[in-house]
């Protein structure tokens, strides 16, 4: 079996297939950093098609392979920097949310956490102490306990 995989006519295809599989893994779960070895494997397969295994074992072949891996790494890192967000995601904790304003998305009933309110783009469970608050009403956060907010009409 290994003799067949290492034969000069099959090995380039095996290398390209492994490289393509690594690129697919990278595409399905970005950040796994499989693009560099995937690109290097595809490069090795293509080089093997044109020059054969003897060339790849030569100093020039090894140098070209290493340069291809370095180029793939640089391009991958550059692309990750371009595609990744420039800022860290915002986080909302119960200490930082008190005093902020938001809008009711699901009716808030006194002393029940069935209501929902959106504050800074995040939806929270909410309750109030003074009457029912209908959806669309602007509210202010007066207290926070875990993921539940206490709000009042503004």
Image (cartoon, helix red, strand yellow):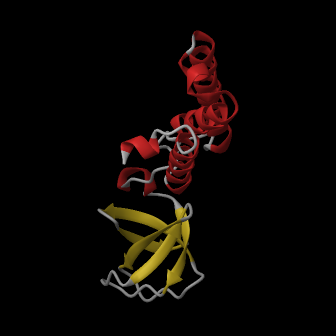
Residue 4, x across and y down, in percent = 44, 46
The residue shown at (53%, 81%) is 105
Q: Residue 1: x percent and y percent?
A: 36, 48
Left-right relation of 67 to 130: right
In this orientation, which residue lies closer to the viewer: 99 or 73?
A: 73
The quadrant in which residue 59 appears is top right
Q: Is residue 148 above or below residue 53?
A: below
What residue is drawn where x is 61% and y is 44%?
Answer: 85
Q: Residue furthest top?
A: 59
Question: In the figure, residue 136 lies in which quadrant?
Answer: bottom right
Q: Is residue 30 visible?
A: yes
Name the one closer to the observer, 79 or 58. 58
**Residue 58 appears at what percent x and percent y?**
57, 14
Q: Residue at the spot x=52%, y=35% of the render?
A: 37
Residue 11 image point, x, y percent: 52, 41
Q: Is residue 89 visible?
A: no
- Count up the numbered dots: 0
Instruction: Look at 62% across and 32% down and name the residue there.
Output: 48
Q: Is residue 3 left or right of residue 45?
A: left
In the depicted structure, whether residue 11 falls above or below residue 143 = above
Q: Which part of the image, by quadrant, shows the C terminus?
A: bottom right
Residue 123 sits above or below residue 30 on the image: below
Q: Vertically, is 39 above or below 69?
A: below
């Amino acid at each position: 079996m290994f003799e067949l995989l290492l034969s000069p006519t099959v090995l380039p295809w095996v290398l390209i297939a492994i490289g393509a599989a690594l690129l697919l893994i990278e595409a399905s779960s970005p950040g796994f950093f499989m693009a560099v070895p995937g690109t290097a494997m595809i490069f090795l397969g293509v080089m093997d098609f044109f020059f054969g295994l003897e060339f790849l074992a030569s100093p020039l072949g090894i140098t070209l392979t290493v340069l291809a891996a370095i180029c793939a790494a640089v391009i991958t890192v550059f692309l990750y920097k371009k595609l990744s967000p420039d800022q860290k995601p915002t986080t909302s904790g119960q200490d930082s949310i008190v005093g902020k304003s938001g809008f009711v998305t699901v009716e808030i009933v006194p002393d029940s956490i069935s209501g929902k309110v959106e504050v800074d783009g995040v939806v929270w469970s909410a309750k109030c102490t003074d009457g029912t608050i209908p959806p669309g009403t602007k509210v202010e956060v007066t207290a926070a306990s875990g993921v539940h907010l206490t709000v009042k009409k503004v």
